[in-house]
Image (cartoon, helix red, strand yellow):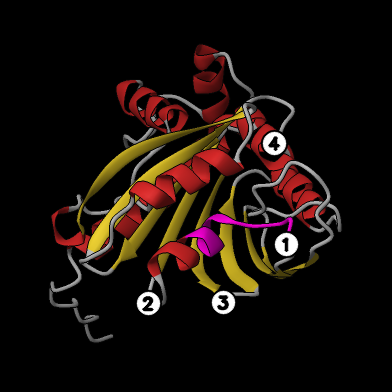
Amino acid sequence: MRELVFALEYTPGTNAVADILADNPETKIRSLSCHVSPDTLWRVDYVTGRESALDDIAETVADAEYYTDCLARRDCEADWETQVLDRTDDALVLYSYWSRTPSCTSIPHLALDHFGDGLIFKTTWVGRRYEWRIIAPDNTTYHAFRNAIESEIDDTTGVTFVRVGDADDAAPDDSSSSLTAEQDAAVRAAVEHGYYKTPREIETYELAEKLDIPGSTLSYRLRRAEAQLAEAYVSDHSSSPHLSSPDA
């Protein structure tokens, strides 16, 4: 299998979701599944971030005139629907479906046109950078597809092609365990100032003052970082035997 990795970069004011993500750097959208047929596209996305950012994203993608994966910068009259499948304070699951029109195309449709069936799509959207990974058969050539993307987007959106190569040689995707720069800084400061020691040497509000951020922001960053680090630890040690509970 061959893998193509590239990213769209949206300039301010050209994509409503990109604007929301840029204003909320801890918010991230990643695809859980993405499927395409010649006439339709449907996908499920997992969004994490602050509650206010999730509210803004849910409202934006539900707008009948906004098509997340459409490359056209105009109303192309696609039949679009987005539903919220699940919602918590810091996570959102979205299901999206739309029908293709002659003037409305997408990256999955372009890939289908150039590579045929059997494609795997994976996306990650942070800030103004919307990264795509496409896995296609070994005999796939990407030159015509690259030209098709560049001809579809206008000068408000840049595209950077990151990698083309064998899928087996790709670096493992650690997006689920990597921390944002803000989360990394918060965890390092917490360790440095004894936040995790017993007894605790500094309280949340005191550490927040040192970092010059609101206490609620610090709590959120630490909570998200701790969750990701814990998930990574469990994943890395999934083969370890479980400890049995001692008898009462």
What is the spatial separation of the Cα atoms under label 4 and label 3, in whole angstroms?
A: 29 Å
Q: Earlier in the sequence, mark 2 or mark 4?
A: 4
Quadrant in the rendering for residue 154:
top right
Q: Is disc 3 placed on a helix, strand or loop? A: loop
Picture coordinates of residue 99, whole percent (x, y): 72, 71
Q: Is disc 2 placed on a helix, strand or loop? A: loop
Determine which residue is flagged by label 4: 20
Question: Is 220 in front, or is 82?
Answer: 82
Q: Earlier in the sequence, mark 4 or mark 1?
A: 4
Kindly report which numbered mark, 1 or 2, lies closer to the viewer in this rendering: 1
What is the spatial separation of the Cα atoms under label 3 and label 1, in whole angstroms?
A: 14 Å
Quadrant in the rendering for residue 213:
top right
Q: Residues within 10 Å of mark 2 (few under 14, many from 20)?
A: few
Q: Earlier in the sequence, mark 2 or mark 3?
A: 3
What is the spatial separation of the Cα atoms under label 2 and label 3, in whole angstroms?
A: 11 Å
Q: Is disc 1 placed on a helix, strand or loop? A: loop
* Count of marks, rendered view: 4
Marks 4 and 3 close (CB-CB < 8 Å)? no
Residue occupying the point 38% across, 66% down? 115
Determine which residue is flagged by label 1: 102
Residue occupying the point 80% across, 54% down? 76
- Residue type of the residue flagged with mark 3: Ser
**Residues shaded magenta:** 102-110
What is the spatial separation of the Cα atoms under label 1 and label 2, in whole angstroms?
A: 23 Å
Question: Is 224 in front, or is 194?
Answer: 224
Image position of 10 (left or right of 131): right
The answer to whether residue 50 shows anywhere in this view is: yes
Q: Earlier in the sequence, mark 1 or mark 2?
A: 1
Q: Please give the label number shown on residue 118.
A: 2
